[in-house]
Image (cartoon, grey):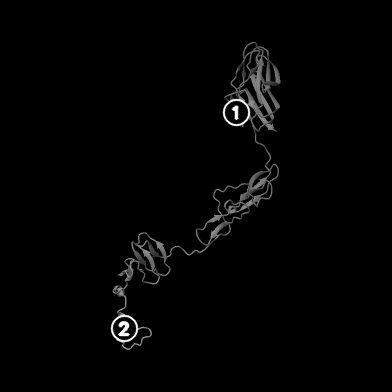
Protein backbone atom coordinates (compact mmCIF):
# COMPACT_ATOMS: atom_id res chain seq x y z
CA UNK A 1 0.00 0.00 0.00
CA UNK A 2 1.44 3.47 -0.78
CA UNK A 3 2.47 5.67 2.13
CA UNK A 4 2.19 9.42 2.46
CA UNK A 5 5.68 9.82 1.02
CA UNK A 6 5.40 7.21 -1.72
CA UNK A 7 5.45 8.25 -5.32
CA UNK A 8 2.38 6.82 -6.98
CA UNK A 9 3.32 5.56 -10.43
CA UNK A 10 0.64 2.90 -11.04
CA UNK A 11 -2.73 4.21 -9.65
CA UNK A 12 -4.97 1.17 -10.42
CA UNK A 13 -2.52 -1.24 -8.90
CA UNK A 14 -1.99 0.94 -5.87
CA UNK A 15 -5.80 1.24 -5.13
CA UNK A 16 -6.24 -2.49 -5.56
CA UNK A 17 -3.66 -2.99 -2.88
CA UNK A 18 -5.47 -0.36 -0.66
CA UNK A 19 -8.94 -2.05 -0.97
CA UNK A 20 -7.53 -5.34 0.21
CA UNK A 21 -6.92 -3.75 3.61
CA UNK A 22 -10.58 -2.54 4.28
CA UNK A 23 -12.70 -4.29 7.08
CA UNK A 24 -15.20 -6.53 5.27
CA UNK A 25 -17.83 -6.24 8.04
CA UNK A 26 -19.17 -3.03 6.51
CA UNK A 27 -20.84 -5.13 3.87
CA UNK A 28 -23.68 -5.85 6.30
CA UNK A 29 -24.80 -2.24 6.08
CA UNK A 30 -25.82 -2.80 2.51
CA UNK A 31 -29.53 -3.25 1.55
CA UNK A 32 -32.71 -1.88 3.20
CA UNK A 33 -35.65 -0.07 1.61
CA UNK A 34 -36.94 3.48 1.57
CA UNK A 35 -38.00 4.65 5.03
CA UNK A 36 -36.15 1.85 6.88
CA UNK A 37 -33.60 2.59 9.59
CA UNK A 38 -30.63 0.69 11.04
CA UNK A 39 -31.37 -1.12 14.29
CA UNK A 40 -28.96 -2.87 16.65
CA UNK A 41 -29.63 -6.59 16.97
CA UNK A 42 -27.08 -7.27 19.75
CA UNK A 43 -24.19 -5.74 21.63
CA UNK A 44 -21.68 -7.08 19.09
CA UNK A 45 -19.81 -4.55 16.96
CA UNK A 46 -21.45 -3.94 13.62
CA UNK A 47 -24.55 -6.04 14.59
CA UNK A 48 -27.12 -3.97 12.64
CA UNK A 49 -30.18 -4.72 10.57
CA UNK A 50 -32.62 -2.68 8.48
CA UNK A 51 -36.12 -2.26 10.03
CA UNK A 52 -39.27 -0.22 9.39
CA UNK A 53 -39.86 2.21 12.39
CA UNK A 54 -43.19 1.87 14.33
CA UNK A 55 -43.21 5.44 15.81
CA UNK A 56 -43.18 7.26 12.57
CA UNK A 57 -45.29 10.47 12.64
CA UNK A 58 -48.65 10.29 10.81
CA UNK A 59 -48.80 14.07 10.30
CA UNK A 60 -49.11 15.19 6.69
CA UNK A 61 -50.60 18.68 6.65
CA UNK A 62 -50.00 22.05 8.29
CA UNK A 63 -52.00 22.27 11.52
CA UNK A 64 -52.48 18.48 11.93
CA UNK A 65 -52.60 17.17 15.48
CA UNK A 66 -50.76 14.07 16.62
CA UNK A 67 -53.34 11.94 18.46
CA UNK A 68 -53.91 8.31 19.35
CA UNK A 69 -56.58 5.70 18.84
CA UNK A 70 -55.07 2.29 19.50
CA UNK A 71 -52.07 3.45 17.47
CA UNK A 72 -50.63 6.83 16.59
CA UNK A 73 -53.19 8.81 14.58
CA UNK A 74 -53.61 12.11 12.76
CA UNK A 75 -56.41 14.65 13.42
CA UNK A 76 -56.55 17.03 10.52
CA UNK A 77 -56.70 20.73 11.17
CA UNK A 78 -60.19 22.26 11.44
CA UNK A 79 -61.57 25.24 9.57
CA UNK A 80 -61.15 28.87 10.59
CA UNK A 81 -63.03 29.75 13.81
CA UNK A 82 -63.59 26.14 14.92
CA UNK A 83 -62.52 25.02 18.40
CA UNK A 84 -61.28 21.64 19.64
CA UNK A 85 -63.83 19.70 21.68
CA UNK A 86 -63.77 16.34 23.48
CA UNK A 87 -66.12 13.72 22.00
CA UNK A 88 -65.85 10.12 23.20
CA UNK A 89 -67.84 8.93 20.18
CA UNK A 90 -64.99 9.77 17.73
CA UNK A 91 -62.01 7.47 17.09
CA UNK A 92 -59.49 9.88 18.66
CA UNK A 93 -61.88 11.25 21.33
CA UNK A 94 -61.47 14.72 19.80
CA UNK A 95 -63.20 16.77 17.11
CA UNK A 96 -63.29 20.25 15.65
CA UNK A 97 -66.63 22.07 16.27
CA UNK A 98 -68.13 25.50 15.59
CA UNK A 99 -67.41 27.98 18.38
CA UNK A 100 -70.67 28.12 20.33
CA UNK A 101 -69.13 29.32 23.56
CA UNK A 102 -69.82 33.03 23.03
CA UNK A 103 -67.39 35.87 22.78
CA UNK A 104 -67.61 37.45 26.27
CA UNK A 105 -64.16 38.44 27.39
CA UNK A 106 -64.98 40.20 30.67
CA UNK A 107 -67.83 40.67 33.18
CA UNK A 108 -67.93 44.00 35.00
CA UNK A 109 -70.02 44.52 38.16
CA UNK A 110 -72.26 47.58 37.78
CA UNK A 111 -74.27 49.56 40.34
CA UNK A 112 -75.63 47.35 43.11
CA UNK A 113 -73.40 44.41 42.11
CA UNK A 114 -70.03 43.11 43.20
CA UNK A 115 -67.64 40.54 41.73
CA UNK A 116 -67.02 40.01 38.00
CA UNK A 117 -63.78 39.08 36.24
CA UNK A 118 -62.04 38.45 32.92
CA UNK A 119 -61.32 34.71 33.10
CA UNK A 120 -62.48 31.47 34.65
CA UNK A 121 -65.78 31.08 36.50
CA UNK A 122 -67.15 34.55 37.24
CA UNK A 123 -69.56 35.28 40.09
CA UNK A 124 -71.75 38.34 40.51
CA UNK A 125 -73.29 39.17 43.91
CA UNK A 126 -76.14 41.60 44.58
CA UNK A 127 -75.07 44.31 46.99
CA UNK A 128 -76.86 43.91 50.34
CA UNK A 129 -78.16 47.48 50.27
CA UNK A 130 -80.02 46.66 47.05
CA UNK A 131 -81.16 43.14 48.00
CA UNK A 132 -82.65 44.32 51.30
CA UNK A 133 -83.31 47.93 50.24
CA UNK A 134 -81.37 49.28 53.20
CA UNK A 135 -79.94 52.74 53.17
CA UNK A 136 -81.40 55.36 50.86
CA UNK A 137 -83.04 53.85 47.78
CA UNK A 138 -84.93 55.49 44.96
CA UNK A 139 -87.44 53.22 43.22
CA UNK A 140 -88.86 54.56 39.97
CA UNK A 141 -91.67 52.71 38.18
CA UNK A 142 -91.07 49.58 40.24
CA UNK A 143 -93.72 47.03 41.23
CA UNK A 144 -93.25 45.51 44.70
CA UNK A 145 -95.02 42.19 45.33
CA UNK A 146 -96.01 41.68 48.99
CA UNK A 147 -93.35 44.04 50.36
CA UNK A 148 -92.65 44.13 54.08
CA UNK A 149 -91.92 47.74 55.01
CA UNK A 150 -90.56 48.43 58.49
CA UNK A 151 -91.14 52.02 59.68
CA UNK A 152 -91.05 53.46 56.14
CA UNK A 153 -90.74 57.18 55.58
CA UNK A 154 -93.01 58.71 52.94
CA UNK A 155 -91.78 62.13 51.90
CA UNK A 156 -95.34 63.32 51.22
CA UNK A 157 -96.16 63.18 54.95
CA UNK A 158 -94.91 66.15 56.92
CA UNK A 159 -96.96 66.36 60.14
CA UNK A 160 -97.97 64.02 62.92
CA UNK A 161 -101.43 62.65 62.08
CA UNK A 162 -101.20 63.17 58.31
CA UNK A 163 -102.90 60.60 56.08
CA UNK A 164 -102.41 59.76 52.42
CA UNK A 165 -104.99 58.86 49.81
CA UNK A 166 -104.93 57.89 46.16
CA UNK A 167 -105.73 60.45 43.50
CA UNK A 168 -106.98 57.88 40.99
CA UNK A 169 -104.03 58.37 38.64
CA UNK A 170 -101.53 56.16 40.44
CA UNK A 171 -100.27 59.05 42.57
CA UNK A 172 -100.88 59.81 46.23
CA UNK A 173 -101.78 63.00 48.04
CA UNK A 174 -101.45 64.22 51.64
CA UNK A 175 -104.40 65.07 53.88
CA UNK A 176 -103.27 67.08 56.90
CA UNK A 177 -104.60 66.17 60.34
CA UNK A 178 -107.94 67.75 61.25
CA UNK A 179 -108.73 69.60 64.45
CA UNK A 180 -110.08 68.14 67.69
CA UNK A 181 -113.64 66.90 67.36
CA UNK A 182 -113.66 66.78 63.57
CA UNK A 183 -114.57 63.60 61.72
CA UNK A 184 -113.28 62.17 58.44
CA UNK A 185 -115.77 62.56 55.62
CA UNK A 186 -115.81 62.86 51.83
CA UNK A 187 -116.09 66.14 49.94
CA UNK A 188 -115.87 66.45 46.15
CA UNK A 189 -114.85 62.82 45.89
CA UNK A 190 -111.82 62.96 48.21
CA UNK A 191 -111.36 62.49 51.97
CA UNK A 192 -111.61 65.61 54.15
CA UNK A 193 -112.02 66.60 57.80
CA UNK A 194 -115.27 68.26 58.88
CA UNK A 195 -117.05 69.28 62.06
CA UNK A 196 -119.92 66.85 62.66
CA UNK A 197 -123.49 68.09 62.62
CA UNK A 198 -125.03 68.74 66.03
CA UNK A 199 -127.36 66.20 67.62
CA UNK A 200 -127.00 62.85 69.32
CA UNK A 201 -128.14 59.27 68.89
CA UNK A 202 -130.68 57.99 71.38
CA UNK A 203 -129.63 55.31 73.84
CA UNK A 204 -131.84 53.55 76.35
CA UNK A 205 -134.41 50.80 76.92
CA UNK A 206 -138.06 50.20 77.87
CA UNK A 207 -139.68 46.99 79.23
CA UNK A 208 -142.98 45.76 80.67
CA UNK A 209 -144.09 42.80 82.80
CA UNK A 210 -146.77 40.13 83.21
CA UNK A 211 -148.85 41.34 86.21
CA UNK A 212 -147.15 39.51 89.09
CA UNK A 213 -148.68 38.75 92.52
CA UNK A 214 -147.06 40.54 95.47
CA UNK A 215 -147.08 38.91 98.94
CA UNK A 216 -148.22 41.06 101.86
CA UNK A 217 -145.63 42.86 103.99
CA UNK A 218 -142.76 41.63 101.78
CA UNK A 219 -140.42 43.81 99.70
CA UNK A 220 -140.54 42.08 96.30
CA UNK A 221 -138.55 42.70 93.12
CA UNK A 222 -140.57 43.36 89.96
CA UNK A 223 -139.72 41.41 86.81
CA UNK A 224 -139.85 42.95 83.31
CA UNK A 225 -139.49 40.02 80.88
CA UNK A 226 -140.60 41.79 77.69
CA UNK A 227 -138.88 44.68 75.88
CA UNK A 228 -140.38 47.59 73.99
CA UNK A 229 -136.90 48.56 72.79
CA UNK A 230 -133.24 48.25 73.84
CA UNK A 231 -130.64 50.26 71.91
CA UNK A 232 -127.40 48.95 73.42
CA UNK A 233 -128.01 45.80 75.43
CA UNK A 234 -129.20 47.38 78.69
CA UNK A 235 -131.57 44.52 79.45
CA UNK A 236 -131.84 40.74 79.09
CA UNK A 237 -135.10 38.87 78.53
CA UNK A 238 -133.57 35.57 79.69
CA UNK A 239 -131.63 36.37 82.88
CA UNK A 240 -131.92 39.05 85.57
CA UNK A 241 -135.03 40.39 83.83
CA UNK A 242 -135.59 42.78 86.74
CA UNK A 243 -132.46 44.80 85.86
CA UNK A 244 -131.41 47.68 83.67
CA UNK A 245 -127.58 47.44 83.44
CA UNK A 246 -125.35 50.20 82.04
CA UNK A 247 -123.33 48.83 79.05
CA UNK A 248 -119.74 49.59 78.09
CA UNK A 249 -119.21 53.10 76.74
CA UNK A 250 -122.50 54.43 78.14
CA UNK A 251 -121.57 55.75 81.58
CA UNK A 252 -123.22 59.07 82.42
CA UNK A 253 -126.55 60.64 83.41
CA UNK A 254 -129.84 58.72 82.98
CA UNK A 255 -133.51 59.47 83.44
CA UNK A 256 -135.18 56.45 85.06
CA UNK A 257 -138.97 56.15 85.02
CA UNK A 258 -141.44 53.43 85.99
CA UNK A 259 -145.08 52.75 86.77
CA UNK A 260 -147.13 49.94 88.33
CA UNK A 261 -150.88 49.84 89.03
CA UNK A 262 -152.25 48.08 92.11
CA UNK A 263 -155.21 45.72 91.91
CA UNK A 264 -158.49 47.34 93.10
CA UNK A 265 -160.12 46.38 96.44
CA UNK A 266 -162.73 47.65 98.92
CA UNK A 267 -160.19 48.32 101.66
CA UNK A 268 -157.54 50.88 102.37
CA UNK A 269 -153.86 49.81 102.68
CA UNK A 270 -150.37 51.22 102.23
CA UNK A 271 -148.01 50.67 99.25
CA UNK A 272 -144.34 51.42 98.69
CA UNK A 273 -142.34 51.84 95.52
CA UNK A 274 -138.50 51.49 95.69
CA UNK A 275 -135.67 52.25 93.22
CA UNK A 276 -132.62 50.02 93.83
CA UNK A 277 -129.09 50.57 92.53
CA UNK A 278 -126.63 47.65 92.67
CA UNK A 279 -128.85 45.85 95.21
CA UNK A 280 -129.51 48.78 97.56
CA UNK A 281 -132.46 51.21 97.80
CA UNK A 282 -131.76 54.76 96.59
CA UNK A 283 -135.33 56.06 96.31
CA UNK A 284 -138.63 55.31 98.12
CA UNK A 285 -142.08 56.46 97.00
CA UNK A 286 -144.74 55.67 99.63
CA UNK A 287 -148.50 55.80 98.96
CA UNK A 288 -151.87 54.97 100.46
CA UNK A 289 -154.36 52.87 98.54
CA UNK A 290 -157.93 54.28 98.31
CA UNK A 291 -160.61 51.58 98.19
CA UNK A 292 -162.60 50.72 95.07
CA UNK A 293 -159.95 52.30 92.77
CA UNK A 294 -156.97 50.92 90.84
CA UNK A 295 -154.22 53.17 92.07
CA UNK A 296 -151.10 53.72 89.95
CA UNK A 297 -147.66 54.51 91.39
CA UNK A 298 -144.98 56.00 89.16
CA UNK A 299 -141.81 58.08 89.26
CA UNK A 300 -139.13 59.78 87.12
CA UNK A 301 -135.69 60.07 88.62
CA UNK A 302 -132.33 61.30 87.23
CA UNK A 303 -129.33 59.22 88.29
CA UNK A 304 -125.58 59.15 87.69
CA UNK A 305 -124.48 55.70 86.51
CA UNK A 306 -121.17 53.96 85.80
CA UNK A 307 -120.61 51.04 83.45
CA UNK A 308 -122.05 47.79 84.94
CA UNK A 309 -124.28 49.64 87.48
CA UNK A 310 -127.74 48.08 87.50
CA UNK A 311 -131.16 49.39 88.60
CA UNK A 312 -134.31 47.56 89.77
CA UNK A 313 -137.86 48.28 91.00
CA UNK A 314 -139.10 46.78 94.28
CA UNK A 315 -142.66 47.08 95.74
CA UNK A 316 -144.34 46.45 99.12
CA UNK A 317 -147.97 46.34 100.36
CA UNK A 318 -149.70 45.63 103.74
CA UNK A 319 -153.17 44.62 102.59
CA UNK A 320 -152.92 41.41 104.66
CA UNK A 321 -152.96 39.04 101.69
CA UNK A 322 -151.50 38.81 98.19
CA UNK A 323 -152.23 41.61 95.75
CA UNK A 324 -151.62 41.84 92.00
CA UNK A 325 -149.76 44.71 90.38
CA UNK A 326 -150.42 45.47 86.75
CA UNK A 327 -147.16 46.13 84.91
CA UNK A 328 -148.13 44.91 81.46
CA UNK A 329 -147.85 47.10 78.36
CA UNK A 330 -151.08 48.93 79.24
CA UNK A 331 -150.52 49.77 82.92
CA UNK A 332 -146.78 49.54 83.60
CA UNK A 333 -143.24 50.13 82.36
CA UNK A 334 -139.62 50.48 83.40
CA UNK A 335 -137.43 52.77 81.27
CA UNK A 336 -133.95 54.30 81.12
CA UNK A 337 -132.96 57.16 78.79
CA UNK A 338 -129.34 58.23 78.38
CA UNK A 339 -128.90 61.98 78.92
CA UNK A 340 -125.18 62.20 78.22
CA UNK A 341 -121.88 61.96 79.98
Image quadrant containing the C terminus: top right
Q: Are marks 2 and 1 in contact (CB under 8 Å)?
A: no
**Would residue 135 be found to the left or right of residue 11 on screen?**
right
**Would residue 154 be found to the left or right of residue 29 on screen?**
right
- The residues bearing labels 2 and 1 have C-alpha atoms spaced at a distance of 163 Å
Relative height, residue 131 to residue 24 (above, below): above
Q: Residue 37: x, y in percent?
A: 33, 71
Q: Residue 309: x, y in percent?
A: 66, 26
Of residues 99 and 259, the one drawn nearer to the viewer in this rendering: 99
Q: Is residue 32 visible?
A: no
Q: Image point 31% across, 87% down: which residue?
A: 11
Of residues 134 and 230, the one drawn nearer to the viewer in this rendering: 134
The residue indicated by pointer 2 is 15
**Would residue 88 be found to the left or right of residue 125 on screen?**
left
The residue indicated by pointer 1 is 228
Classed neighbour count for the residue bearing mark 1: other residues with Cα under 10 Å, few (<14), some (14–19), many (≥20): few
Q: Is residue 213 visible?
A: yes
Q: How many marks?
A: 2
Classed neighbour count for the residue bearing mark 2: other residues with Cα under 10 Å, few (<14), some (14–19), many (≥20): few
Question: Disc 2 on helix, strand or loop?
Answer: helix
Of residues 316 and 269, the one drawn nearer to the viewer in this rendering: 316
Q: Image point 70% across, 20% down: which residue?
A: 285
Q: Image point 54% across, 59% down: which residue?
A: 116
Of residues 18 and 277, the one drawn nearer to the viewer in this rendering: 18
Relative height, residue 83 to residue 250 (above, below): below
Quarter assignment of residue 337: top right
Disc on the earlier residue, 2 or 1 = 2
Q: Residue 1: x, y in percent?
A: 33, 82
Q: Residue 199: x, y in percent?
A: 68, 38
> Which residue is the extreme one toward the bottom?
9
Quarter assignment of residue 3: bottom left
Amino acid sequence: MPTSTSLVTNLPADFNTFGQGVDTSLQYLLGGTTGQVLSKTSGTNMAFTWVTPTDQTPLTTKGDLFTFTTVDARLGVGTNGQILSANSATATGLEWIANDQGDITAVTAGTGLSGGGTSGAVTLAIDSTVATLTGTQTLTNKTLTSPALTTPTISTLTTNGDTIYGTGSGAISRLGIGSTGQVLTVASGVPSWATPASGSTFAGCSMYGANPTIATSTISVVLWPTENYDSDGYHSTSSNTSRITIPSGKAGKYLLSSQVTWEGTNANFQTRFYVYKNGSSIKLIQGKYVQDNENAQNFSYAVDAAVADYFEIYVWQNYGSNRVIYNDSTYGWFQASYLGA
